[in-house]
Image: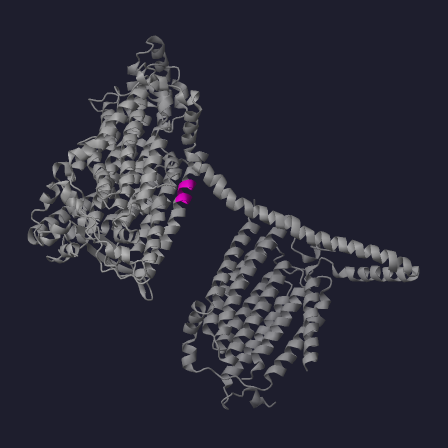
Amino acid sequence: MWAFNFLLLSAALFSIGVFGVIARRNAVMVLMSIELILNSVNLNLIAFALMNNSIDGHVFALFVIAVAAAEVGVGLAMVLMIYRNRRSISLDELSEMKG
Amino acid sequence: MSRAPMLLAVEGPVGEVSGWFLENAWLIPVIPAVAFFGILLFGKKLPRGGSELGIASMVAALVLAAGATYQWIDGLAAHKKAAGNYEVEPVIRDIVWWQSNPFEFGLGQHIDGLAIALLLLVAFISTLVQVYSTEYVAGDRRYTHFFAALTLFSAGMLAMVLAPNMVQLILGWEIMGLCSFMLIGHWWEERANSEAALKAFFTVRVGDMGLLVGTAMLLGIFGTLDIKEINELAAAGEFDSKNMLMWTAVALFIACIGKSGQFPLHTWLPDAMAGPTPVSSLLHSSTMVVAGVFLVARLYPVFHVGLDINVAGQQFNLIAVIGAITIIIAALLAFVQDDIKKVLAYSTVSQLGYMMLGLGVGAWTGAVFHIFTHAFFKCCLFLVAGSISHTASHHSFDMKKDMGGIWRKMPVSFGAWMISTFALCGVPFFSGFFSKDEIIDSAKHFEYTTLWVVSVVGAGLTAAYMTRATYLTWFGTPRGGAAHFMGVEHDTHGEVHEHSAHPHEAEHADAHLPDHTDDAHDTHGHDDHGHDDHHAPHGKPLPFAPHDSPWKITAPILLLAILAIGSGYLNAPALGIYWFEHQTESSIGLPIDHGDEHGEEGGDHSGEEDEHEEGAAVTELALGTGTFVAAEGGDGHEYEAPGEFAVPAPPTFTWRNAIWPGLTLVAVLFGVALLLSRAVFGGEKNPASRFVGLTKRNKAAGGIHSFLVNKYQLDNLYENGIVHAVAHPIAKAAYWVNQNIIDGIVNAVGKGGKRSGDALYKYVDQGLVDNAVNLSGTAASEGGHALQPVQSGKVNQYGALLFGAAAVGAILLIILNA
Amino acid sequence: MTLASLFAQADGGVNVAQNVGFYIIAAGMLWAAFRVVSTKNVVHAALWLVVVLGGIAAQYILAAAEFVAISQVLVYIGAVMVLFLFGIMLTRATIGADTDVFNKGWAVGIPVALLVFGVLAYVTIDFTEDSLLVDPTEEQIAATTTAISDGYLGPYLVPLIAVSFVLLAAAIGAIVLARKD
């Protein structure tokens, strides 16, 4: 198998995730896109582990999974809070950070 | 140099005792531990709220402990007959709990005389206190949880007493700490109670640091956490550095200071009286607080060798000095307390000081025996205090406000109190006399002269403050709640019951209120009947105590009072009884040095009793025989003691030693205190009357008094001195850094900016053509405006910028690296 | 690049099954990922995400990372997806088709995504050129989980503890943020 197979797939997933983050309005959808990005990174790590015949990639992938789980938890809690305060999770309407 | 102590250990086979109860003694803590979960899970559904489970488990533990005791005594007697000595191997069983290369940590049991004595004691007192509690906390809203915590506490103590290794010891130790927190704060709705619980928890925790550090050091020195091995290695001098062992002993002793309320960490114990009285009785007088003493007794070789106890020419050592300070300090504090439980609490602290002093001067047996006797009489005193508050003083513990003159009405409680007080004061033929006298005698005999004087003075002070407390509680004119109880006044009836902790009692009082008030109006001042009526529902009063507490309260008190006399006769040197000593002497972990000539006599121990009968001159030789030369000479880094540490044999009892000066001082101070009490509290004219109001008239006396009332300012010291001294400067330093450094930087930057702006304005702006200025201004403004849409506040756009910029940056890197 | 070279192995052989599996799964994943970001229905998007995550787990297995694959299934498909569905339900997002899926500036996403992909693809191919993956031996595969655990309790112990604190903080933070007070 070509060594770049996994890496290219990962790059494609990453880009799709980037598109999702940029394009979607729904905050939950943005979080899902971020999950796509994180997973593509994981795939990269596993591919590197395979290429270098080392276990570190696996260990890091598991770390990323743990951190991603934490991220989803906090992210969804924030979305919930925003929803409770504003009755909407459309990111178009969130512009408090406007300079 | 004679190898006398080793001879004792070597000659004759070391005995074994066995039996089902001894082999399975590990069940003793397991049963209450299981019962704890049972109470927690099902307690509320049981008809008696879980108390029956708690009592049943304690009775089961008591039966097992009694069986083990019987088999131990039996086995020891058989061994004595066969081998002529009391050297018996402990019964050890353990399982590997967990393993961490290369160490194995086990759970199990280590049964020897010391463990047996304490197992029996703890199981017995726990049982009595639980029975007592069924009445005392009846109707409490957390009745079930109370029994759950009480049961778990007993399990923790029993597990600690049984511990074959330091890990289990710490486990039990911490379970006790947790339970004491739960039980002191049982009525946590009152702020003072929850604060007392926190204080107890944290103060003990300060000491526990020492336990963890000490345990780690033990592991470092001996490579094992097994108590038996540690003791053997320490006693044989098989360690590299004497210094290390000394610091280990110090660290472990810090834990004991915290747990056993020794100076300077004693402040938590009196505050812990905020808990219900059964808790004070069980935890803070007779069992938990002796955990520290137990630890010292259990690891005695470590302390004995590490702190140079009984080394010839050593006047002081850490344990004995701390014990001595504690005796005096706590005894003095007991004089200024109005709360009966606090008097008893300080008395406990003082008695714990005796135990530590005993261990510190080498009187191992005396100290352990004092644990044993003290538990009975102090538990009894606390239960009597609870009985008074429950029955006579409407849940008040204030001796000055709510007690006095009640002795006639509560004969059982009063009798038990007097017996226990006599035992506490060391009146001859009560139990406290035999144990305390042995400690005091040993201090003198082993040439700790200063400490001996302190301990004698302490004994006198004990007599005096107990006289004051007794007078205030039982004699004189009834006051407050007690007056009401005695039927002297009636108008406080309704008001008093507002403070009732027992809902059912309050209801009951309300139900009876109408006819009761009528009664009060009719027969002013002689209304015993109404009170009978009121107190009868607590239980069936004993026929000979028409006004005393119900039987669930008086029965434990009576039993303990009997033991407050009887337990002393297990080891009464005055009568030539050394039974307790023989039962426990194999637990010391060090051979007993009976002096040179006895060692040379070899195996002739049939006449061991005679040794004690011989004159003081004989045992005088126990010291200074050169046995401790090794201990002195081995201060270097390579410590090669040949293993000749030994505790000296207890001194021979003589009445002359006991009476002068100990008992004499006790008697004198007893008389003085009685006179003073009558003068001050009873308003009677007697030779002591001119001291009445001394604290108000005399500044020095007043100063001392307020110093005592403020508990030597120790609480203030901890609160203001330590907590604030640590927390405050840090906050202050952070604030200073914030104010001076960070603000300084910010200000400097700002000022610099302003200055450069000024300069710009002066030279560049004024100097350049307005056009250029306008141009640059416009450029900046336009640039800002052009970039403003970027700061849209839209997350998506930020994301686009982020990824776009990252990609562009990556492209730049690729091009640069290509 | 012939068709055979597509399936080439480092040892000279051709493992068609592995490669075919990879391409089929990869195609499915890409399509599913595209649907995730483009579908109008939020719940559908979540379900398409399940397909992507499952595909990634399958790719892990192809890459001889069973333990990570199992963790992926447990954590992502098991836990994270449930969280997402809860998030969708609790925020009462339109369950059916959403009229206005994309925000106003969505078109920016396409060039940025293409730019990112271009950079990544270029770097990847430039980096690996035409090297081939060496399949791990059976012993290595069998020892993977042991090696991971050794790694966690050995050199990566401190990061492990740090991550557990992160999880704890996240759990507490999520509770604090989400509770109604």
- Does the stretch in magenta take in B201? yes
- Does the stretch in magenta take in B67? no
Q: Is residue C54 visible?
A: yes
Which quadrant holds residue B414? Answer: top left
Q: How many numbered tags mark residues here? A: 0
Q: Can residue B60 be seen in this view?
A: no
* Whether residue B256 is situated above or below residue B187 in the rendered picture: below
* Along the viewing direction, whichever of C73 and B687 lies nearer the viewer: B687
Q: Residue at x 46, y 66 (%)?
A: C157
Residue B724 coordinates in the image, percent (x, y): 51, 42
Residue A4 coordinates in the image, percent (x, y): 58, 81
Residue B41 coordinates in the image, percent (x, y): 34, 45
Residue C79 coordinates in the image, percent (x, y): 50, 61
The span shown in magenta is B198-203
* Along the viewing direction, whichever of B736 and B19 lies nearer the viewer: B736
Q: Which residue is drawn at 35% across and 58% down?
A: B217
Quarter of the figure with the N terminus of chain B: bottom left
* Whether residue A76 is situated above or below residue B801 in the rendered picture: above
* Along the viewing direction, whichever of B377 and A40 lies nearer the viewer: B377
Quarter of the figure with the C terminus of chain B: bottom right
- Outermost residue toward the top in this view: B522
Q: Which residue is drawn at 41% across and 20% down?
A: B495
What colouring does the structure picture have? one colour
| Prevailing secondary structure of the magenta residues | helix
* Along the viewing direction, whichever of B703 and B419 lies nearer the viewer: B703
* Whether residue B546 is situated above or below residue B285 in the rendered picture: above
In the rendered view, does C133 fall on the left or right side of B420? right
Which quadrant holds residue A76? Answer: bottom right
* Whether residue B701 is situated above or below residue B514 in the rendered picture: below
